[in-house]
Amino acid sequence: MYFASDNSGPVHPEVLTALSDANEGYAMAYGADALMDEVREKIRHIFEAPEAAVYLVATGTAANSLALATLCQPFQTVFCSPVAHIHEDECNAPEFYTSGAKLTLVPGEDKMTADALHATIAAEQTRGVHGPQRGPVAITQVTERGSVYSLAELEELCAVAKSFDLPVHLDGARFANALVALNCSAADMTWKAGVDAVSFGGTKNGLLGVEAVVFFDPDKAWEFELRRKRGAHLFSKHRYLSAQMAAYLREDLWLKSARMANDNAARLAEGLRAKGAEFLHQPQANMIFAAFPRAKHQDLFEKGAMYHLWGGSMDGDPDEMLACRLVCDWSIGHDQIDAFLSLV
Amino acid sequence: MYFASDNSGPVHPEVLTALSDANEGYAMAYGADALMDEVREKIRHIFEAPEAAVYLVATGTAANSLALATLCQPFQTVFCSPVAHIHEDECNAPEFYTSGAKLTLVPGEDKMTADALHATIAAEQTRGVHGPQRGPVAITQVTERGSVYSLAELEELCAVAKSFDLPVHLDGARFANALVALNCSAADMTWKAGVDAVSFGGTKNGLLGVEAVVFFDPDKAWEFELRRKRGAHLFSKHRYLSAQMAAYLREDLWLKSARMANDNAARLAEGLRAKGAEFLHQPQANMIFAAFPRAKHQDLFEKGAMYHLWGGSMDGDPDEMLACRLVCDWSIGHDQIDAFLSLV
Amino acid sequence: MYFASDNSGPVHPEVLTALSDANEGYAMAYGADALMDEVREKIRHIFEAPEAAVYLVATGTAANSLALATLCQPFQTVFCSPVAHIHEDECNAPEFYTSGAKLTLVPGEDKMTADALHATIAAEQTRGVHGPQRGPVAITQVTERGSVYSLAELEELCAVAKSFDLPVHLDGARFANALVALNCSAADMTWKAGVDAVSFGGTKNGLLGVEAVVFFDPDKAWEFELRRKRGAHLFSKHRYLSAQMAAYLREDLWLKSARMANDNAARLAEGLRAKGAEFLHQPQANMIFAAFPRAKHQDLFEKGAMYHLWGGSMDGDPDEMLACRLVCDWSIGHDQIDAFLSLV
Amino acid sequence: MYFASDNSGPVHPEVLTALSDANEGYAMAYGADALMDEVREKIRHIFEAPEAAVYLVATGTAANSLALATLCQPFQTVFCSPVAHIHEDECNAPEFYTSGAKLTLVPGEDKMTADALHATIAAEQTRGVHGPQRGPVAITQVTERGSVYSLAELEELCAVAKSFDLPVHLDGARFANALVALNCSAADMTWKAGVDAVSFGGTKNGLLGVEAVVFFDPDKAWEFELRRKRGAHLFSKHRYLSAQMAAYLREDLWLKSARMANDNAARLAEGLRAKGAEFLHQPQANMIFAAFPRAKHQDLFEKGAMYHLWGGSMDGDPDEMLACRLVCDWSIGHDQIDAFLSLV
C-alpha cells in the first residue's frame, strides 16, 4: 500500500533488461552512442518534430533548470504557478541555472488561468530598466496538484505568452500521464499549442532516472549542450541513459505505464469517492488529493499504508477530515489499492 | 582493441545484478534508502572516518564542482595543475558552482610540486582586497597524465596548503587506480595526508555513473546537501545510485577492478617499451602516453584500434614519432592488448 | 513644482563645498582616506555602536544587494514586502549578488505585519532540502509607500526573525526621514530593535550618490569588503564619497534636511487634505500618495508640475479620482508647494 | 612627491565647477538628464561613431566587468594578459559579472603579442563541449606596466580575434594617456583597429569617479543597460556623473590632462635615466617602472616621497638595485618631480 510518490516504485523490468543489453563492449561517451541516435529519432517522431533538439539528463530539476536557463536571461523573470515544482521544490535551482533570474508567481491555487497569466505579465516590466524583464512562461503538465490542462487551456496560456513575445516551457515530469489523460498527441500538447521546450519525464514513469529535454527550435541546441556540461549533467557513460529512454519509447512502454498509473489512480479515486472521501482537486491523472477522517489515517498508517498527509498532522480530533496526497505509479497492483480502500 | 577511455567500457556485471536486486518494491527517495546507509557505513569504514559526510552524485564534474563550491568562496581562487580536469574539461563548471571563483594554475606539466604550489599561493593575495583571495588546493590523483602522487608528495602538498590555512580537495576520479598503485590505505591517501574532501570515483571503474563525495569534516554535510539539490544533482530514485556503489564496495570489487585495469596498462606499457615506444609520462596506473611512428598508428587505426592521438595529427611523415593516449579499464582482455601490441 | 522624486533635486551646497575642501593634494585610495576615518567614527557614534563595520557605496541598490549577499546563502530566501525596492526596482540585483537566492513575498500592501511575516516564514522551509531555506528578513524604512514602521512594529518584526534565528536587514534609503518622523535614536531604530545591518541612505537626502552600509556584527566586515570589491563598488578616489558623507553628518545636516523634507510633505499633505484629496496611505515622512480629479492633474501638468501618476492614466473621465505619488525633498520651497496647492 | 597612483591626486578644478553648475534645480534621474545627451553626442563625435551606445559608470572595474559580461557567455573564456587588471586587481569581478566565465592568460610579461594570442586561442576549445569556449579578447591600453600598444599591434591583435570570430574589449582606464602617446584618433585606436567595446576612463585623469563604456554595435545597448542596473551601477542622480564627463570632454580637458601626466612622467623618466636608473619597461605614458639602489629609496621615503616598491622590500643590501612603480597624474608639478630627482 505504497502511495507516497511515483518516484519510489521499482523500475520497469524491460528497462533493466535494456541496461543489460546495452552493456556489450565499448560505446562512444557523452551522448555519441548509437542508442542516443535511436532515442533522438524516436522522440522527433513522437513529437512530429524532425528538427527538434533532443537531450537527456538524469533529474527533472536538471531538465527544468537547464531548459529555463536556455530560454531566460538573468535580468528576466519566469512566470509560473505558486505551486510549481520549479518554485517550491528545487531549492533555487532555476535561480542558480539562470544566473539569478526571478520567478514571478501567477496568483492561483493550482492551474494558471490565461487571465491571471495575462494580468501578471502585464503588471511586470512596467518600470523600464528598474524591474525584472519579462521572461519565459513555465507550465506544469500534470500539475503538482494532479490536474491536467486541457489542450484549449494550454493554447490559451501559450497565446498569452506569445502576445508578449515570450517563450513557453512545459515541465512534463508526468508528461505521459497527461497525454494519456488527454488522449491527444505529443505534438498537440506541445508545439502545436505553442510550447517551445519540454521536460519530457521518464523517472516517475518507470525509469531509473532519465528525462529528455526537447527544444523545437534547433538553434538552442549548442547552448543547451554547453549549459548541460557546465552544469555537470553530461554523462560520460551516456549509453545507460539512452538505453533507459530507448526502452521507454519502444513499443509504447511509456504510454502503457502511464495508462496503468492513471487507471490505478482512477480505481483508487472511485473507491474513495464511494467511501465518502472529499477531493481537494478532481483527480485527472495519477495523483489524488483527498480528505477523510483522521481516524482512518490512523488506521491506515498502522496497517502499513505509506503516503503523505497534506497540510495537517495526526494530532487532533479523530473525526476531523484530514487531507492527504496519494500517488499511483504503474507498479501498484489492484490488490494493494483494494486493500487500501477496504481500510478507509 | 579499445583504449580510448575508461568511460567507454561496459559496466561490471555484478553492478547490473545489484540494480536488479535493488528493484524490489518501494524505497525511500532522495538518499533515504537503506542501501545508502550501507554505502555510508562502508565508505566510513574504508576511510577509517566514522564521522565523515558521504554523498553520491552521478558525474565526476558534479562531485568536483559541488565539493569545491562547499570549500570555496566566490571571491577566492582554487589552486590546481594546468592540466587538471576541473580546469580543462568541465566547461567552467567549477566557476559556475562556486559562483565565480577563479582557478589559479600552478606552473608545471603534470603533477604539482610543493615548491611550485608554495610559490603560487605565496604570490597570490598580495594585493589585499583587490585580488582574488586564496582558496582550496585541488589535487588530482591519478593525474590526467596517468601519474600517481606518492604519499610523501601528497603530504607535502597538503602541508603547503595547511601552512596557508587552505583546505584540500582530491579529485579521485581514478581513486582506486591510485590506491592500488600505491598499495596504501584510503585513509593514508586522504585525511592522514591532509586531504579535506574527496571525489571518490566509480564511473571510470565499472559503474554506470556514480561518484561519492566524502567530507572528513561532517560540518560541511548540510551545506553540501543543499548545494547538491540546488545543482539538480539529488536523485529521487537514489537507490539505483546506492546499489551501484554498494556493489562496488562489496567484496572489494572496486579494488579488484582497479587492479585489473592497472595490470592491463602495465602489460600494455611493457609491450610498448619492448617495441621501442617512447613514454611522455611514466605509466603508473591505467593510462599510458606513448609515442611511436605515425605509420604504426595508421596501421592500428586501419585494423580497428580505438584511442586518441595526443597533440598531433595523422598528416605527416610516416616515420615521425607521434604521441597517443591509451587507457585501460578492467574489461579489456589480454588478447586485445596482445593483438594491439602485435600490430605496433 | 517638482515632486517626481527625491533623487532629482539638487545636492546640498554644503556637500559641494565639502567636495572642494577634500580636493587638496593626495589622499590614500580605496577607503583609506582620513575622511573615511571621520565618517566611520561619526556613524558609530550616531548608532551607539563602537564596533560597527561601516562602508560606503554609491547607490542604494548596491547597499542593499551587498548587505543581503553578506547575510544570505544562495540556497536561501529573503523575506520582504511585495512592494519592497529590492523586489520591484532593482532588476534582480539581490538575486545576482546573492548568487541566486530567492525573494519570498510577505502578503500585504505596504508594511509587513508581524503575523504575516511569521506565517510566511513558518510556511517556508517545510520541505527539507527541496525548498529554499529561510534567510534574512528585509524591512524598508520609510516604506515605498511613504509609511513609517513604529519602533514597536520594528521590534515585533525583528522578534519574529529572531524566533527563526534569521538576520534582519533594514533598507534605509530614507533612514533620516524615518528617524525624524519617529523622533527616536538611530540605535533605537536599528540594533536595539533587532536589526543586524542597515543601508543608511544619503542620496535621496542631499548627497550626489552615497549610502553607508552598517553591520553591527564586525565579523561581517571583511566578507563585505571583498563582496564590495568583487561587485565593482569600491571607489579608488574614495575620499569624494567620504567627503559627502562627512558633510552629511556634520552639524546634523542629514537630520535637518530630512526634517525639511518631511515638513514640506506635511505642508503639502495638509493643503491637499483641505482641498479634499484622498490619501492612499497616511503620509508619515516625505512621500504622499493622494488622489484628486483627473482634471486637476491635467491642469497641474499644463502648469508645469512634475510628478508621477500612480496606477492610472490621463485618459478618462475628468471628474474621476486619479492617484499620484508626490515626493518632497529638502530643497522644494514653500512657494512651490503653495503654488501647487493653489492649482489643485 | 606623490607618485603612488593616478587615482590619488585631486580632481581637476573645472570638474568641480561643472558639478556646481549642474546643481541647479531638478533633473531627470537615471541617465535621462540633458548633460548625458551632451556626453553621448560628444563621445560619438570623438569616436567618429554616430551610432555608438554610450553609458557611464563610476568605477573602472564596473566598466570592464559589465562590458565583458555583455560580450561573453558564462561557458566561454576571456583572453587577456597575465598582468591585466581584470585578472589581478578586480577580485573576480569579471567572473562574477559573466556568471562564471574563465580568464585564459596569454603568456607574456606585459603586452600580448599577436603570435602568443593566436597560439593561446588556438589551443583553447579543442575539446568540444568539455572545455571552455572561446570568448572575447581583452586588451589593456595603457598596459598595467605603462606600455602602449602601437596601432599596428592593436590591429594585429584584433585581426587574430576576428580570425576566430571573437569580439575585442579595450580596457582604457588610461585611454587618454595612450591616445596622447600615440598621437592618433580615438577611432584609430578602437573600432578602426577592430575593437568592439571600450572602457573609456576618466577617474585616473582628473575626475572624481566616472568611466564611459562605449559599444560600437548599438545592438548591445539594452542588454548593457539591464546589466548595469542589475549590477547596481545605475546612478539615480546621474547628472553628477554626466557633469564630470561633460567637463572632461569640453575643450579637450581630457587630452590636456593626459598630456600633462605623460609629460610629467617623461620628465621624471629622463631625470631618472640621467641618474643611472634602470627601467623594467620603457616608459611610454604616465607610469614608470624603474630600479635604483635601495639606499636611494630609503632616502626618498624619509624625505616624504610616496610610491610603491615593485616586487621587493626595504630589507637588504643598501647598494642593491630595487624596483619601484612611479605614476604621474596631471597635477604633479615640475617642482615635485625635480625635488624627487634631486634626491635619487
Image: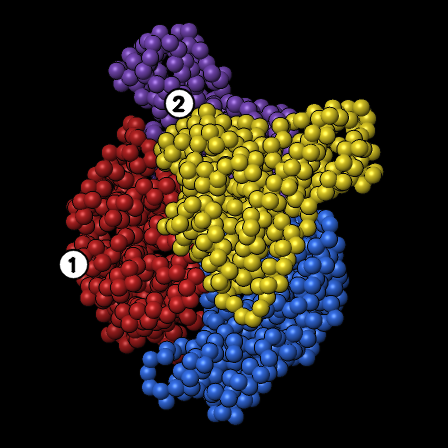
Chain colours: A purple, B red, C yellow, D blue
Query: Is C275 located above or below residue C339 in the figure?
Result: above
Q: Between marks 1 and 2, how big is the CA–CA gap?
A: 49 Å
Location of mark 1 (residue)? B184
Q: Specify the quadrant of the image occupied by residue C135.
A: top left
Element at badge 2? Answer: strand
Which residue is painted at 37% across and 26% down in the image? Answer: A5
Q: Residue furthest front?
A: C251
**Disc marking residue A327:** 2
| Residue type indicated by callout 2 | Val
Q: Is residue A24 visible?
A: no
Q: Position of residue D177 (x, y in %)?
A: 62, 75
Which residue is painted at 57% across and 35% down in the image? Answer: C181
Q: Given the image, what chain letter belongs to the residue carrying mark 2?
A: A
Q: Which quadrant would the N terminus of chain A be assigned to in this image? A: top left
Viewer-nearest residue: D21 or B232: D21
| Residue D14 left/right relative to D233 | right
Query: Is D271 located above or below residue C253 in the figure?
Result: below
Element at badge 1? Answer: loop
Q: Position of residue C284 (x, y in %)?
A: 60, 32
**Disc marking residue C142:** none
| Residue D249 left/right relative to B183 | right
| Residue type indicated by callout 1 | Cys
Q: Position of residue D304 (x, y in %)?
A: 46, 78
Q: Is residue A5 visible?
A: yes
Which residue is painted at 72% across and 42% down in the image? Answer: C333
Q: Position of residue C309 (x, y in %)?
A: 72, 34
Q: Given the image, what chain letter belongs to the residue carrying mark 1?
A: B
- Give the class, few, some or many, for how many residues have Cα within 10 Å of label 2's Cα (few <14, many ≥20): many
| Residue A172 left/right relative to C329 | left
Q: Which quadrant would the C terminus of chain A be assigned to in this image? A: top left
- Give the class, few, some or many, for how many residues have Cα within 10 Å of label 1's Cα (few <14, many ≥20): few
